[in-house]
Image (cartoon, helix red, strand yellow):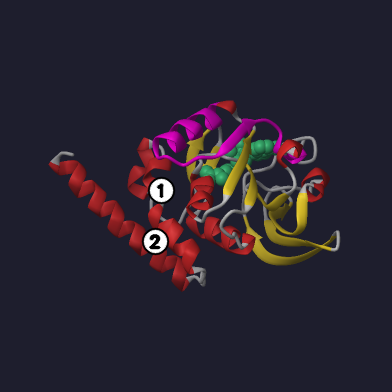
Amino acid sequence: MNHLEGQKKSRFQVEREEMIELLRTRGIKDERLLAAMQKVERHHFVDLPFKNRSYDDSALPIGSQQTISQPYTVAIMTEALAVRPGDKILEIGTGSGYQAAVLVEMGARVFSIERHVSLLNEARKRLEQLKYDIVSKAGDGTLGWKDFSPFDGIIVTAAAPDVPEPLSEQLQEGGRFVIPIGDLNVQDLYVITKIHQKLSSRKITGFKFVPLIGKKGWQ
Ligand code: SAM
């Protein structure tokens, strides 16, 4: 490692610690989640022109008109997912791979689907280099991944018009399902649980996601 790299790493480390403090002040309480987000180096998931903003609490472009989600959004969704070590989690919208890495750091077995092949290839390369082991495929995530179902948790990282039925069917009894639902401009985050085969939900208001495009999403 050269001298400049050393400086850069310590700067990112400091900024990451500041990001975690900000998440705490915004109400994130799950210490296992905060420790996972402290570990995952977000700057590896951010495109070169935006590296300086890697630890800003904002979404950033990753190509194909998509974004890596804002850290607060990742935190609130992951906290709501209540991940336990060994849980089998389905993620719809691999994007940069950052959310998947946070889930792996929390001990989850991650299955992730992305509709943009180029984004998936980039994310796979990055995750492999960083030694995050996930199972992934390119395709329409609104149909879920039956071969590996049922899942203890499902997280959809793009905005849906409604709950895609195949996903709720692939949720384990007692499982949690986190999904933004609304129109194309603004969405609420729904935290859905399946108890005795029935879905019950609570709502966290006011989010803005890229659209979930697919057979059971936006056409
Ligand atoms: N989780 C990502 C991360 O950590 O970088 C952020 C993902 S971005 C906000 C949402 C992603 O969902 C985009 O990459 C988009 O291409 C993807 N997406 C949209 N509709 C999809 C679908 N039906 N199936 C799979 N991926 C989809």
Q: Could you give the CA–CA distance between mark 2 and mark 1, rounded to whole angstroms?
A: 11 Å
Q: Which mark is residue 19?
A: 2
128 falls in the magenta region: yes
Q: Would residue 2 be seen by someone viewing this image from the given angle?
A: yes
The kind of residue tagged 1 is Arg
Q: Which residues are magenta?
A: 118-144
Quadrant containing the C terminus in the rendered view: top right
Q: Compared to 24, does 14 lie above or below?
A: above
Q: Which mark is residue 52?
A: none
Q: Position of residue 194 (x, y in %)?
A: 79, 60
Task: Categorize mark 1 by other alpha carbons within 10 Å: few (<14), some (14-19), many (20+).
Answer: many
The kind of residue tagged 2 is Met
State yes or no: discs 2 and 1 in contact (Cβ < 8 Å): yes
Residue 51 located left or right of residue 159: left
Q: Quadrant of ligand 1?
A: top right
Q: Which residue, given by chain and number where applicable, does mark 1 sit on?
A: 42
100 falls in the magenta region: no
Residue 147 located left or right of residue 26: right
- Please tell me in which quadrant of the rendered image residue 141 appears: top right
At horizontal 32% and vertical 58% (from top left) the residue drawn is 15
